[in-house]
Image: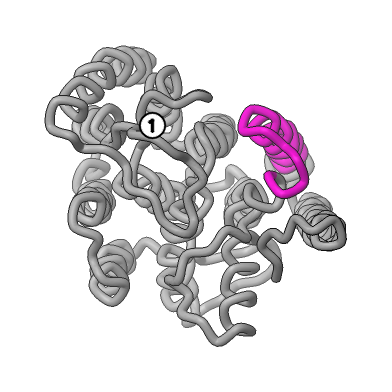
Amino acid sequence: MVIYIIASFGVSAVIIPLVILLCKKRGWYDSTNGRKVHSGSVPRLGSFGFVPVFLVLSSMYAAELPGKSWAEYLPLSGAGLIVFLMGVVDDFYELSAKIKLLIQCIAGAIPILFKFSISRIGPIEPGFLGPILTFIWIIGVINAFNLIDGVDALCGSLSLCILVTLGTALLIAGSEYWVLPFMLGAGILGFLLYNKPKAKIFMGDGGSQFLGFSIAVLPLCPFPAGSGIEYNMFALVIVIASMPILDTFAAIWRRSRERRSFFTPDKLHLHHKLINMGYTTKSILGFLLIIQAGMCGVSLLAAVWIKGNKGFAILCGAFGAMLVFFTIIHYTNHAFLRGKEKNGNIGDSE
């Protein structure tokens, strides 16, 4: 099992330099828009260093599992491939928002058709609403990780923390799928060797959207009966993914209030606000990773060891703490922008 994790890291670390050379030779550089903060020519398509590797290795691993595990995993792998290919095409041709949403909806419906669905969020059992919530969840998380991918290594590093936490929870629960999050995380680690500030390559929309899809569907995999972790597993993922999720909710609220399309880019995401406040790319990455690591540690403790309603209460408290964090950043950013305006240096404002 561990060999798959090692192979994922090794192959990714070897492939990424080749992808960089290819992108430079063909002129495949990342575009700039109203959301991105980088300048200069930076190769894209870093996702080719870890997504195809993960899809192949994970399918090989699933094929070795007893029973119908491979057949059960195949729909998730196929839907993930759809998301990845759509993101890659978008990197080249900038698909319209409607086409991207349509393809995301198709990919999001596949797990549901094969009975992967939210069955419990702590003491809450959604019942017949489970498939609907699952569909909204998958589409939302895909876009959340795409939107958070705005600073060198941020999306990859946050995803790595989340996947390690999820893999640890599945391992303790005795789930045969525990290897998958670690395998994907190892591939991301190989990519991060070249994506750390100052980035030599970006993962592109194909990578960020695939990561969002994977993090959305992995907690839907079956758990061994009686493990007890399934009670808070989905709540665990909501909390550890709350940074990109809340950033997306803020974007929806902001654009709805201003009567703009949700797909209209702007520079008012979490990392943009920290830039307004004087943070550098490296300091933003370090600051947010410290918060992410703390959230992952507390959430894992609550879901895996405390469990039950007490664990659920702690998870709710952790999510509330993240809400407070976003509120503080929002008003601090406002204060900095007002200060700039008074000094004649007008920046973006909400």
Q: Residue at x 50, y 41 (%)?
A: 155
Looking at the image, the residue that sits furthest to the front is 344
Quadrant where the C terminus is found in the figure: bottom right
Position of residue 200 relative to residue 161, above or below, is: above
Q: Residue at x 38, y 24 (%)?
A: 200
Q: Quadrant of residue 177?
A: top left
Position of residue 200 relative to residue 259, above or below, is: above
Position of residue 283 relative to residue 299, above or below, is: above
Q: Amino acid at mark 1?
A: Leu
Task: Give the residue pinned by disc 1.
Answer: 184
User: In the displayed structure, does residue 245 sit left or right of residue 225?
Assistant: right
The secondary structure that most of the magenta stretch takes on is: helix
Residue 119, given in percent of the width and then of the height, sits at 52, 66
Asked if the magenta segment contains residue 335, the reply would be no
Q: Residue at x 71, y 49 (%)?
A: 276
Residue 180, given in percent of the width and then of the height, sits at 38, 33
Number of labels in the image equals 1
Q: Does residue 64 appear in this view?
A: no
Q: Quadrant of residue 121?
A: bottom right
Q: Residue at x 85, y 56 (%)?
A: 343
Q: In front: 18, or 168?
A: 18
Residue 14, given in percent of the width and then of the height, sits at 26, 13
Residue 242, given in percent of the width and then of the height, sits at 64, 54
- Region rendered in magenta: 275-299
Is label 1 in a helix, a strand or a loop?
helix
